[in-house]
Amino acid sequence: MMEALTKLVISTYKHLYQDEEYNLEVIKDNERIIKFKNQTIQLDNFVATRYRLTFSDYEGVIDDFRDQFDEIYGFVYYCCDVSNFIDLTETFIKQINDYYERL
């Protein structure tokens, strides 16, 4: 599932910013860091089937990711979130990746 989460982050960033340049660092089996030009995003599997994207800032890129995910889900899920992370379930990860594959 970490491969799917990595794909999700790269696809979302590319879709939002038309930027494919990144550096991937695998820390452990359940933890990775993706560095883009203007953002660092940590990916981890923190509890069983729950995954977390932690952003280097609590506004900006994370807001764009939240808005994009809300659009993909078809409902507003992250409207009042002010943290620097986004939690995702395996179902949400699959749904988001399926969306990008259809584009």
Image (cartoon, rainbow, N blue to C red):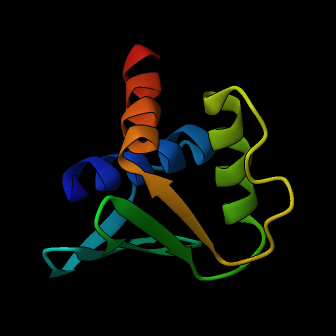
Vertical placement of 48 versus 68: above or below?
Answer: below
x and y percentages locating residue 20 in the rendered image? 41, 49
Residue 101 spot, x, y in % from top left = 36, 22
- Of residues 75 and 18, the one drawn nearer to the viewer in this rendering: 75
Furthest-front residue in view? 48
Looking at the image, residue 66 sits to the left or right of residue 56; the answer is right
Between 19 and 2, the residue placed more toward the observer is: 2
47 vs 65: above or below: below
Quarter holding residue 55: bottom right
Task: Return the residue nearer the eye: 72 or 37.
Answer: 72
Residue at 70% across / 31% down in the picture? 71
The residue located at (46%, 41%) in the rendering is: 92
> Which residue is most to the top?
102
Q: What residue is shown at x 26% (from left), y 70% (from top)?
A: 24
Task: Check the image and report above or below for 66 versus 87.
Answer: above
- Image location of residue 56, percent across then percent down: 59, 82
Image height of 63 relative to 97, above or below:
below
- How many numbered discs? 0
Q: Which residue is at the far right?
A: 80
Q: Nearer the viewer, residue 1 or 21?
A: 1
Q: Position of residue 11 (x, y in %)?
A: 42, 42
Q: Image point 28% across, 75% down: which residue?
A: 32
- Left or right of 58: which side holds 51? left
